Image (tube, helix red, strand yellow):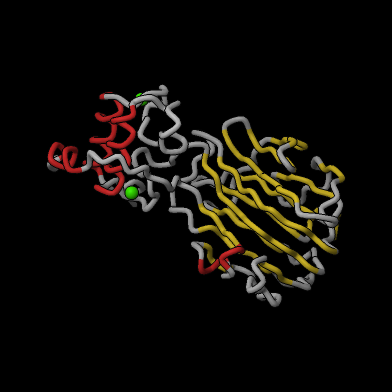
């Protein structure tokens, strides 16, 4: 063990720590997702630009793809443990949705897959959405929603109770998770060569874990080190997770019992000794 006690004294500050383990793309920064911890994985950029403060791309045709994948650390997402969501604030013009060549596809996709390839995908068009847990999806749940006339928040969640889709906070579709997909994926955009969209506008996309994927790793750099310890001590001093001054989601409460006490400290020290969250 390293000299935790000395750091404990040094870290007794009252500085509120921010930053939970979320991957956020904000187009208001006027940069493309690949400048904000996402990787472009499409076949064409489709004139993507965020210079106006909104990410716009299109037309995105059939036969090509335009999408981005969040750089979530390998092994971080495990849908058997707790929920993970991918949420996008979008407006879709001319985004197709329907069954094509035996596959249901939409011009905008949200997809999420954990470290063991458990997954769910939302296929989204300008006027209809569906979710699926296999490649074809032709008879999977779907619902009509107008996503063309304004910006809406579409959220796809995967976790121990399965997959679910909501729009503007209202849950619309549910489905069990699929298995056997490529592990560790969390992406958005035109991910299908069977669908298209005239114009896609994105204000924000966010990967939201229900809790910190690596206990103690508050800044989500996959290491539990002194930077995280500062946040832990801040929470330890406040004690009560319901304290308004507590860091959002109370990340120092590692055993999730609502208070930050010595039990959490023991867990933190254990993680601090291991240091690396997702080895191998
Ligand atoms: Ca860390
Ligand atoms: Ca606790």
Q: Please indicate whether residue 128 sits to the left or right of residue 21 in the image.
A: right
Residue, x 34% and y 39% (percent of image)? 216
**Screen quadrant of the N terminus:** top left
Q: Please indicate whether residue 148 sits to the left or right of residue 193 in the image.
A: right
Residue, x 31% and y 37% (percent of image)? 234
Q: Nearer the viewer, residue 214 or 119?
A: 214
Q: Nearer the viewer, residue 38 or 100?
A: 38
Q: Quadrant of residue 273?
A: top left
Residue, x 84% and y 60% (percent of image)? 96
Quadrant containing ligand 2: top left
The spot of residue 130 in percent (x, y) is: 78, 46
Residue, x 30% and y 30% (percent of image)? 236
In the depicted structure, whether residue 145 falls above or below residue 107: above
The spot of residue 269 in percent (x, y) is: 23, 35
The spot of residue 10 in percent (x, y) is: 17, 43
The spot of residue 37 in percent (x, y) is: 49, 62
Q: Quadrant of residue 62?
A: bottom right
Count the labels in the image.
0
Q: Please indicate whether residue 39 sits to the left or right of residue 51 in the image.
A: left
Q: Quadrant of residue 132?
A: top right
């Amino acid at each position: 063990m390293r000299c935790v006690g000395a750091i404990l004294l040094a870290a007794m500050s009252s500085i509120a720590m921010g930053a939970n383990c979320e991957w956020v793309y904000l187009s208001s920064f006027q940069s493309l997702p690949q400048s904000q911890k996402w990787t472009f994985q499409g076949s064409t950029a489709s004139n993507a630009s965020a210079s106006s403060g909104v990410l716009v791309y299109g037309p995105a045709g059939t036969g090509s793809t335009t999408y981005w994948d969040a750089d979530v650390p390998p092994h971080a997402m495990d849908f058997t443990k707790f929920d993970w969501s991918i949420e996008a604030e979008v407006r879709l013009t001319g985004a197709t949705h329907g069954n094509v060549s035996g596959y249901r596809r939409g011009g905008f996709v949200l997809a999420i897959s954990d470290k063991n390839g458990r997954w769910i995908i939302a296929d989204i068009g300008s006027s209809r959405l569906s979710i699926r847990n296999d490649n074809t999806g032709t008879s999977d749940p779907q619902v009509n929603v107008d996503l063309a006339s304004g910006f809406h928040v579409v959220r796809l969640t995967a976790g121990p109770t399965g997959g679910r889709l909501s729009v503007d906070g209202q849950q619309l579709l549910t489905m069990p998770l699929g298995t056997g997909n490529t592990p560790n994926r969390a992406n958005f955009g035109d991910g299908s060569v069977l669908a298209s969209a005239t114009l896609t506008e994105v204000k924000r996309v966010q990967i939201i874990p229900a809790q910190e994927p690596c206990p103690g790793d508050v800044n989500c750099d996959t290491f539990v080190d002194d930077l995280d310890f500062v946040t832990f001590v801040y929470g330890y001093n406040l004690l009560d997770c319901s304290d308004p001054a507590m860091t959002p989601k109370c990340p120092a409460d590692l055993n999730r019992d609502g208070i930050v006490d010595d039990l959490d400290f023991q867990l933190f020290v254990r993680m601090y000794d291991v240091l690396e969250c997702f080895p191998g």
